[in-house]
Image (cartoon, grey):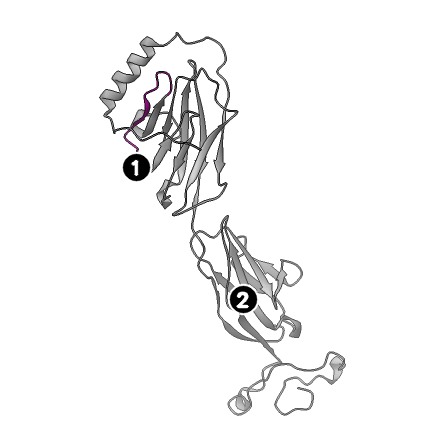
């Protein structure tokens, strides 16, 4: 969309004087219900370093006199970014909250370049038609997510014990998902997830629970996946006196072997391990 050149920064006193002069010179306010507008954001998900545009829906009528944008949930002059005067055609007059990145236009839109994280917040536009009306929108600035990590990244668990893995997610994460050997898993049966999905727990671990686990984090603009954490399931631990010389080995007993023939613990090179 086309944008008018930026006007000079003005003081609150000059703003009040200009606004009063326009109110006196313009037609009297029209009694009755003020029109309703909503604000459309483009793009829907804004990111740090990018840009965003706010436009009004439906388009403003031709009799609009001026529109002011505020970095606040109300039309407080202390948080005014600019006031765009259409009738008379004075263009953009910048306010106290103007940062040099905001541009207005005759359709009462606002464009912000080079977005900062602290641009997150509520924005309000006030229109004089000549009856005043307000509309607000909440803006969230997202950042691309860095790679998460699964902790611990290498764990050995005795069969029928508990597996606990935690996803160390980066700032800005909105959702967390878990994968086991590349397939997405969800809470069911022996597998449970914390309310924020950042901790995965497998109760009564079985041989089929071994393998590669990863967590995947997402927000409105990006997705990133951790490196795989390896989970090894071993048979019942051997007696302590044998452990230094004969550590437990992964349970590799064929599923077809009857459980009555499964040894109480696996010692290499046991033929069934």
Residue 71 drawn above or below residue 61? below
Q: Nearer the viewer, residue 94 or 122?
A: 94
> In which image quadrant can residue 27 be found?
top left
Residue 164, numbered circle: 2
Q: Where does residue 268 sit, x and y in percent of width and height? A: 61, 90
Magenta segment, prevailing SS (helix, strand or loop): loop
Q: Give the mark nearest the N terminus, 2 or 1.
A: 1
Mark 2 secondary-structure assignment: strand
Q: Are marks 2 and 1 in contact (CB under 8 Å)?
A: no
Residue 100, numbered circle: 1
Residue 56 drawn above or below residue 157? above
Whether residue 71 appears in this view of the structure is no
Q: Where does residue 229 sit, x and y in percent of width and height? A: 53, 70
Q: Where does residue 85 sit, x and y in percent of width and height? A: 35, 21
> In which image quadrant can residue 96 be found?
top left
> In which image quadrant can residue 63 be found?
top left
Q: Where does residue 79 sit, x and y in percent of width and height? A: 32, 30
Q: Look at the image and tell me in which quarter the N terminus lies.
A: top left
Q: Nearer the viewer, residue 268 or 170?
A: 170
Q: Nearer the viewer, residue 116 or 74?
A: 116
**Residue under the point 61% across and 89% down:** 267
**Residue under the point 50% across and 63% down:** 166
Determine crowd level at label 1: few under 14, some 14-19, many 20+ residues with C-alpha closer than 10 A: few
Q: Provide the residue span drawn in magenta.
A: 86-100
Between circles 2 and 1, the one closer to the viewer is 1
Cα distance in 3D space between marks 2 and 1: 50 Å
């Amino acid at each position: 969309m086309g944008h008018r050149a930026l006007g000079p920064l003005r003081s609150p006193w000059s703003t009040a004087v200009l606004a009063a002069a326009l109110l006196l010179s313009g037609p009297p306010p029209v009694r009755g219900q003020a029109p309703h507008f909503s604000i459309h954001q483009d793009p829907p998900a804004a990111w740090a370093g990018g840009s965003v545009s706010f436009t009004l829906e439906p388009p403003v009528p031709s009799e609009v006199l001026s529109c002011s944008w505020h970095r606040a949930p109300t039309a407080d002059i202390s948080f005014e970014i600019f006031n765009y005067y259409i009738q008379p055609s004075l263009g953009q007059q910048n306010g106290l909250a103007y940062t040099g990145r905001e541009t207005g236009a005759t359709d009462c839109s606002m464009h912000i370049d080079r977005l900062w994280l602290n641009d997150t917040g509520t924005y309000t536009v006030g229109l004089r038609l000549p009856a005043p009306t307000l509309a607000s929108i909440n803006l969230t600035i997202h950042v691309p997510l860095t790679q998460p990590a699964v902790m611990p990244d290498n764990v050995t668990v005795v069969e029928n014990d508990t597996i606990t893995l935690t996803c160390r997610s980066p700032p800005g994460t909105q959702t967390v998902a878990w994968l086991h050997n590349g397939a997405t898993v969800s809470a069911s049966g022996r597998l449970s997830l914390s309310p924020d999905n950042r901790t995965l727990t497998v109760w009564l671990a079985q041989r089929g629970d071994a393998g590669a686990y990863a967590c995947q984090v997402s927000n409105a603009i990006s997705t990133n996946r951790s490196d795989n954490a390896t989970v090894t399931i071993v048979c019942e631990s051997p007696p302590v006196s044998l452990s230094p010389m004969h550590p437990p080995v992964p349970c590799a007993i064929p599923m077809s072997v009857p459980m009555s023939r499964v040894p109480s613990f696996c010692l290499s090179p046991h033929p069934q391990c």
